[in-house]
Amino acid sequence: MKLREFLLEGKKNRSFVAGFLIFVSVLLVVVFAGVIAPHTYDGMDLDNVLVGPQSAFPFGTDNYGRCIFSRVVFGSRIAFRVGLIVVAIESLIGVTLGLVAGYYGKWADRIITFATDMTWSLPPLIMALAIVTVLGPSLNNVVIAIAVVSWAQFTRIVRAKTQAIKNMPYIEAARAFGESDASIMLRYILPNVLSPIIVLATLALPEAILSTTMLGFLGLGAQPPQPDWGVILKEGIAYIYKAPWISIFPGLAIAYTVLGFNLLGEGLRDMLDPRLKV
């Protein structure tokens, strides 16, 4: 699909337009967090503890007098960064294994398919929780844990696409001219499976953000005073009746971001590969 056709199709796709606008708004917050936030995320003001939303503190303050709005804004950087890193790692693992399994077949395919099915059959959040428990609570360990348990969907799709492509005439011609297997996979097969990879990556991003937030809420991800949305939610639970804004606003930020990426992913799926089911 040419760029012009892609843009014209995108204008007709409401999910894509809505998701793209939300994505752009989140990206602007991530980039300009230091300008948008009126305070530092860890700046305490003991004279303004548990103050409700007002002009000086648009989302109110927490039990340390920290500005919730500033913490939510800076927290977007953590969510976005972790989501991108997780998706990059899991797509690299999944795409590589999918290409190898689909191209070579035989014992390589059997081993990779077995590992993929085993990973696919286990609840990813439970597995990530177990891995982080072993490695210890930290944001880096959360990234590793989520990426390790989430690559199977990429492998399944890429493997199936590779099997359908590897016997095409232009692949046979490349073999006849003596091109290596690695060159064939990277130059001829990979470009033809980019569309589903892009769609899967877009849909995997909100899953990564949600998983990171959940583990942060459980105390296994980012650690205070980092402004992770899950950490803010956890800290707000003790004041849910007295100061509900501590939990409400990071919760809305999570919902807004996840909704945007899901809409963007669904729109891309409809435009690039309508037959792809994830």
Image (spheres, rainbow, N blue to C red):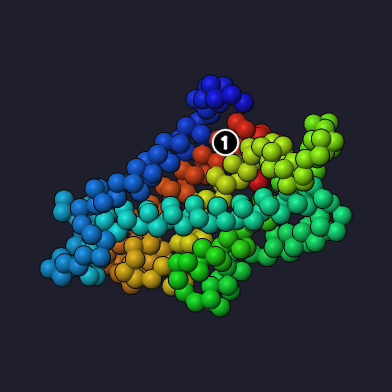
The secondary structure type at the circle numbered 1 is helix
Q: Name which residue lies at 81% across and 39% down.
A: 178
- Determine whether, in the image, residue 250 is placed left or right of residue 265: left
Q: Position of residue 44 (x, y in %)?
A: 20, 67
Of residues 253 and 116, the one nearer the viewer is: 116
Q: Residue furthest front?
A: 178
Vertical side of 192 occupied by 108: above or below:
below
Q: Amino acid at mark 1?
A: Leu
Is residue 91 shown left or right of residue 250?
right
With 63 as the anchor, is 142 left or right in this view? right
Query: Which residue sits at x=51%, y=40%?
Result: 263
Q: Residue at x 26, y 56 (%)?
A: 70
Front position in the image: 85 or 244: 85
Q: Quadrant of residue 148?
A: bottom right
**Numbered-mark total:** 1
Image coordinates of residue 45 in percent, x first then y, are 16, 67
Residue 12 against residue 175 in the figure, above or below: above
Compared to residue 220, the image places residue 147 above or below, namely: above
Residue drawn at 80 percent across, 61 percent down: 111
Tell me which corner region of the image, top left, top right, bottom left or bottom right, holds residue 115: bottom right
Q: Which quadrant: the N terminus? A: top right
Residue 126 drawn at (x, y percent): 60, 69
Q: Which residue is mark 1?
A: 268
Q: 87 above or below 272?
A: below
